[in-house]
Amino acid sequence: MPDAIATPTIGAEGHGGPVQIFYLKKGAARRPQIARAEGIYMWDTEGRRYIDASSGPVASNLGHGNKRVLAAMIAQAEKAAFAYMSAFESEANVKLAELVTGLAGTGFERAYFVSGGSEATESALKLARQYAVAKGEASRWKVIGREPSYHGGTLGALAVTGDPVSEAMFGPMMKTMPKVPAPFTYRLPPNHDADSYASTCVAALEDCIRREGPETILAFIIEPVGGLATGALVAPDFYYDAVREICDRYGVLLIYDEVMSGAGRTGRFLAAEHWPGARPDMVTLAKGIAAGYTPMGAVLAPDRMVETVAASGGFLHGHTYLTNPLSCAVGFAVVSEMVERGLIANAEKMGALLSARLEALKAKSAILGDVRGKGLLLAIEIVMNKETKAIPPAERMAVYRIAELAAKRGLLVYSRRTANGKYGEWLMISPPLIVSEAEVEEIVELLALSLADYEAELRAAKLI
Ligand SMILES: Cc1ncc(COP(=O)(O)O)c(C=O)c1O
């Protein structure tokens, strides 16, 4: 395949230019330009085709160009694209709230719609705080997070995010919250297996609550199935029940950040459904709930919380695009389509197939160390040596290079070196929920070739 992005280069313009100017060094090759997208495929303006194998940043759950969603977008825009919530209710809001809370089930009677995952985190933290104050527990304000984790890029969300690199940069600007270790299952401390380490992580939560003072702890926030920060980490089942029990014991709210794992991606509407004995008090959603067709996030909360906050004077929070009618209409079409086409069940079925194919690839590959996740929220971890699980040398930026090689083969994969690779390096393999069996095979075939390309580079450099 010819080099798609040899010219022009970043920074060539005197002013303006693409947003990548904020990320790439001057003179770096520019990204291809998007021309169109349909289903799981995307085309650039040079006519090259790519498979959207990670759904962008695990967002495009419905794939691209869905006609029903586009029609709903036009229909609502023609009626009223925008109407602010202090003046009007909107039917689109009511319909989406009914649909989403109905799918989420008992304990999630209310839905608060915002413009993305970070706003959802901010809204959840503030709702939790106001609820505690309204109940007479004003001493509770600390929200424990996990290390590593990701809950958003705004300063409040970053305060509960476990990312030492972001914390080093932005820590002075925020009130950083306590962290406990995430229960990794592959890269473990010496003398641990996944279960014993998860037990240690549970004990660390209780220790943290006691050390900080239980009367000061408002909530514990986790990604029930990990996102980019942990590479689709799934803890042993008992972890979820044990965490729920500790939160109950100390009156701490449990918040599941399902920005990535929610809206059907793991084969359930909420990943929380995988652990029915450990229902959280609140859930955040984003990404899949509008599947990239509009910016959207949501907080799901029980009626008791919302009533208490409303009765105490109302929620001290809001955004201009809160419950935007256009976004709600799009979200309603997305979620309806997902339910009516049986895409949640497809996520479970195709997830099992993809996971099995990735395991088979692991058996053959010298650098694929681990496959993990649930449903279609899957990741593969890259190592230099499968025996020692050695992390690739930092300067090779291994997963970013693999993503580059994959893009050359027409496969788009989202990758991450959390905290500069301190915890390992992984690629998300999380295609849209519409993916077919044949498309799964195509993804795995291209991924195998891309990993082989990278292995060849490592062999040439005598690194493996
Ligand atoms: C688990 C999780 N929470 C929160 C966010 C932030 O969402 P957004 O980028 O829409 O603000 C993300 C984004 O990747 C995420 O994966």
Image (tube, rainbow, N blue to C red):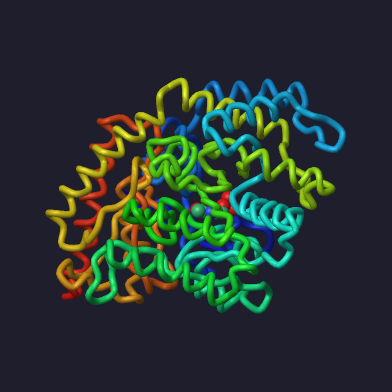
Where residue 365 sits in the image (x, y, percent)?
16, 57
Asked whether the viewer can see residue 4, the reply is yes
The relative height of residue 129 versus residue 393 in the rendered view (above or below) is above
Which of the image's four quarters has the C terminus?
bottom left
The residue depicted at 49 percent of the width and 43 percent of the height is 59
The relative height of residue 257 versus residue 101 in the rendered view (above or below) is below
The relative height of residue 242 versus residue 210 in the rendered view (above or below) is above
Q: On the rendered structure, is 296 left or right of 390?
A: right
The residue depicted at 46 percent of the width and 37 percent of the height is 61
The residue furthest left is: 364
Where residue 97 sits in the image (x, y, percent)?
64, 31
Where residue 326 sits in the image (x, y, percent)?
69, 31
- 4, 202: nearer the viewer: 202
Where residue 101 sits in the image (x, y, percent)?
58, 32
The residue depicted at 63 percent of the width and 57 percent of the height is 17
- 107, 316: nearer the viewer: 107
The residue depicted at 41 percent of the width and 38 percent of the height is 47
